[in-house]
Image (tube, grey):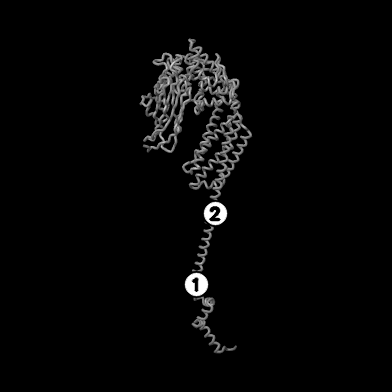
């Protein structure tokens, strides 16, 4: 084995020592300057391990933060785009709904024009209009049923307005598909020519067939009214609020049509004897001697109705045929006695001192049954002015004795000239017979069906609207249904639309009421501290009677003083919850007779007028309390029908707040 040389060992030891001690300063400096990477790799101890880890961690956090910020920016950008896009989409859908609703509204107006004259309906044209209406409303419905649009309805401020637009659209679409087609079909089938009497009978079949559709249409309109009424107007901007109010008004108008049609379809068949014969007492009101409902019941006719066929049975005059009831035939309430004494239960001519026709009708029916033994199922009242409306559709009617009745002559013949013609000592019997014959001839002409059915039906509608055609039935369910119509002849008991009654009752047994000319004006007064609104009801009466030449029966038998002085009582029925404050007559404070009928305060004033004289009675009232001064109140007027129609004016009254001075 060869021994190592000493030199080699020494060199080896020095090299190892050098490596352990590290390179010389100069060598280290050169190595560090010329090759840092190498120096670091060869001498890792020059960079501590802990510092290196912190630098790596810090670099990763920066990257993550930068990346998070970039993602957030993208999210915000995308969200902004979505919001802007959604807003634009909702705006576009709203515009579409508005445009289609506008077109649908125009179609409804066109349809109303096409249905005005139901005797000349163009079926093809109305069908095209309905189809157009349905198309436009369907397109509007599609716009508001859009998911994005519906989601936007939950947003604050904007949401309630969008939701209101949707409610309006859904309502219009439902009516266009569920109501309008059936109403158009009914208008085409329920023509006046089908409903008007023919040969003394009314054909009940068309009415019975249409009943189900009419009930459905009325229910749909009622539901729509409730839906629109449920919209909170306080959160709506003006244009949308106006649109909601406009639709609400149109629905109210539609409800009056569908409600009337549905009610007529429920009532007419049974009341005209579809289920069993009915017996009615028809009373003719003599307007020359005013009573609250119109005039005294001067004559009557008893009729039976079986399957729409009308047959006359009896006739007479309440005063002379039924006579006087002593003791009174019925017990009146204390309020009635205080208002009218016991006269309504004693004298047939005074049963309608009250303006409530159901009360007067029930009393005259009771009197008729007591005297004749015949029960009646109801009472119908009509006056000569109503007959003149019906004669517009019949042509001239021969009343006998050389008298021809026309729309222009029937009123003066029955209420004036008949008293002069039979003022020859022949007594009341001849005049009564003539009046009964004349009224019967006019009624028979209407029932014959030979005239213009459309004009006859229009005459009936006009007469009912003026309280000249009144109906009462003993059937409670039917009477409840009638109570919602003008035919019932009773004052409203609600307070939503306050009603004021002005009624006349003749002060003595004369016929000078034929010459009365009347006017009533309702105007606003001040707000009161209790929140009520003061109003004035100005009643002007004029006597146009001549000062001589009238028969004694007209001027009044056994009338004290000047027989040509017209004497009447004016009664003011305040609104429900309203009150009567004071009364003046021709500017002077007047004493007033106060009373109560039902829920209404009543005040009465006596008036005397010489021929050619006028008088002005002003009633000061307080309307019911209203806590919202922004609510407009429009009272309605109920008046005693006269020979001449009342001239009226009614101001729109603003509500009052409780803080009003």
Q: Earlier in the sequence, mark 1 or mark 2?
A: 1
When the figure is inspected, residue 579 is found, relative to residue 302, above or below; the finding is below
- Which residue is nearer to you in this view: 11 or 577? 577
Question: Residue 47, how many percent across, how many down?
Answer: 49, 74
Specify the label residue 501 is tagged with. Answer: none
When the figure is inspected, residue 448 is found, relative to residue 261, above or below; the finding is above
The quarter of the picture where the C terminus appears is: top left
Question: Residue 130, how many percent across, how many down?
Answer: 60, 37
The quarter of the picture where the N terminus appears is: bottom right
Q: Secondary structure at mark 1?
A: helix
- Which residue is nearer to you in this view: 305 or 617? 617
Residue 584 is left or right of residue 125, and the answer is left
- The residue lying at 56 percent from left, 89 percent from top is 5
> Do we see residue 363 in this rendering?
no
> Quadrant of residue 216 in the image?
top right
> Do we see residue 360 in this rendering?
yes
Residue 538 is left or right of residue 466, and the answer is left
- The residue lying at 37 percent from left, 34 percent from top is 528
Badge 1 is on which residue?
49
Q: Secondary structure at mark 2?
A: helix
Question: Residue 314, how many percent across, how many down?
Answer: 53, 15
- Which residue is nearer to you in this view: 489 or 524? 524
């Amino acid at each position: 084995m060869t021994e190592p040389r000493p030199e080699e060992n020494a060199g080896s030891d020095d090299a190892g020592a050098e490596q352990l001690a590290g390179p010389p300063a100069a060598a280290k400096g050169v190595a560090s300057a010329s090759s840092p990477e190498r120096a670091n790799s060869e001498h890792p101890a020059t960079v501590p391990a802990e510092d290196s880890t912190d630098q790596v961690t810090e670099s990763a956090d920066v990257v993550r933060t930068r990346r998070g910020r970039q993602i957030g920016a993208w999210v915000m950008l995308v969200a902004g785009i979505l919001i802007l896009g959604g807003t634009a989409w909702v705006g576009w859908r709203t515009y579409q709904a508005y445009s289609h609703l506008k077109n649908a509204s125009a179609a409804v107006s066109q349809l109303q024009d096409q249905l005005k004259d139901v005797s000349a309906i163009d079926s093809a044209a109305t069908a095209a209009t309905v189809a157009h209406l349905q198309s436009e409303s369907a397109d509007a419905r599609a716009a508001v049923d859009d998911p994005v649009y519906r989601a936007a309805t939950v947003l604050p401020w904007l949401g309630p307005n969008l939701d209101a637009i949707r409610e309006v659209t859904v309502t219009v679409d439902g009516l266009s598909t569920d109501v309008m087609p059936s109403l158009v079909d009914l208008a085409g089938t329920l023509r006046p020519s089908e409903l008007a009497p023919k040969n003394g009978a009314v054909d009940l079949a068309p009415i019975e067939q249409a009943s189900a559709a009419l009930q459905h249409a009325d229910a749909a309109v009622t539901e729509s009214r409730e839906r629109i009424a449920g919209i909170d107007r306080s959160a709506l901007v003006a244009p949308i609020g106006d649109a909601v109010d406009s639709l609400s008004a149109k629905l109210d108008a539609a409800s009056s049509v569908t409600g009337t049609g549905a009610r007529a379809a429920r009532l007419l068949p049974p009341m005209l004897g579809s289920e069993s014969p009915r017996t009615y007492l028809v009373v003719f009101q003599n307007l020359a001697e005013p009573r609250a409902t119109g005039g005294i019941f001067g004559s009557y006719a008893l009729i039976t109705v079986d399957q729409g066929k009308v047959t006359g049975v009896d006739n007479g005059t309440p005063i002379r045929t039924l006579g006087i009831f002593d003791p009174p035939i019925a017990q009146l309430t204390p309020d009635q006695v205080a208002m009218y004494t016991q006269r309504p239960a004693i004298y047939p001519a005074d049963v309608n001192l009250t303006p409530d026709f159901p009360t007067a009708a029930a009393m005259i029916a009771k009197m008729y049954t007591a005297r004749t033994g015949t029960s009646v199922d109801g009472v119908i009242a009509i006056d000569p002015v109503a007959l003149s409306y019906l004669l517009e559709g019949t042509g001239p009617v021969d009343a006998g004795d050389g008298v021809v009745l026309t729309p222009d002559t029937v009123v003066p013949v029955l209420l004036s000239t008949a008293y002069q013609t039979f003022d020859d000592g022949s007594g009341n019997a001849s005049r009564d017979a003539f009046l009964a014959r004349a009224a019967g001839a006019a009624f028979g002409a209407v029932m014959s069906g030979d005239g213009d059915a459309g004009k006859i039906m229009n005459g009936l509608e006009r007469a009912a609207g003026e309280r000249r055609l009144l109906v009462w039935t003993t059937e409670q369910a039917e009477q409840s249904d009638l109570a919602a119509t003008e035919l019932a002849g009773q004052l409203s008991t609600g307070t939503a639309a306050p009603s004021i009654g002005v009624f006349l009752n003749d002060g003595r047994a004369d016929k000078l009421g034929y010459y009365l000319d009347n006017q009533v004006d309702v105007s606003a007064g001040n707000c009161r501290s209790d929140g009520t609104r003061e109003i004035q009801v100005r009643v002007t009466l004029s006597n146009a009677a001549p000062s001589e030449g009238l028969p004694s029966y007209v001027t009044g038998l056994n009338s004290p003083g000047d027989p040509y002085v017209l004497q009447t009582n004016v009664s003011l029925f305040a609104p429900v919850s309203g009150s009567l404050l004071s009364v003046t007559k021709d500017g002077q404070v007047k004493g007033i007779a106060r009373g109560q009928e039902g829920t209404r305060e009543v005040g009465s004033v006596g008036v005397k007028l010489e021929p050619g004289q006028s008088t002005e009675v002003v009633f000061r009232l307080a309307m019911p309390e209203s806590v919202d001064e922004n609510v407009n109140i429009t009272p309605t007027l109920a008046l005693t029908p006269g020979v001449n129609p009342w001239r009226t004016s009614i101001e729109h009254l603003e509500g009052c707040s409780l803080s009003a001075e």
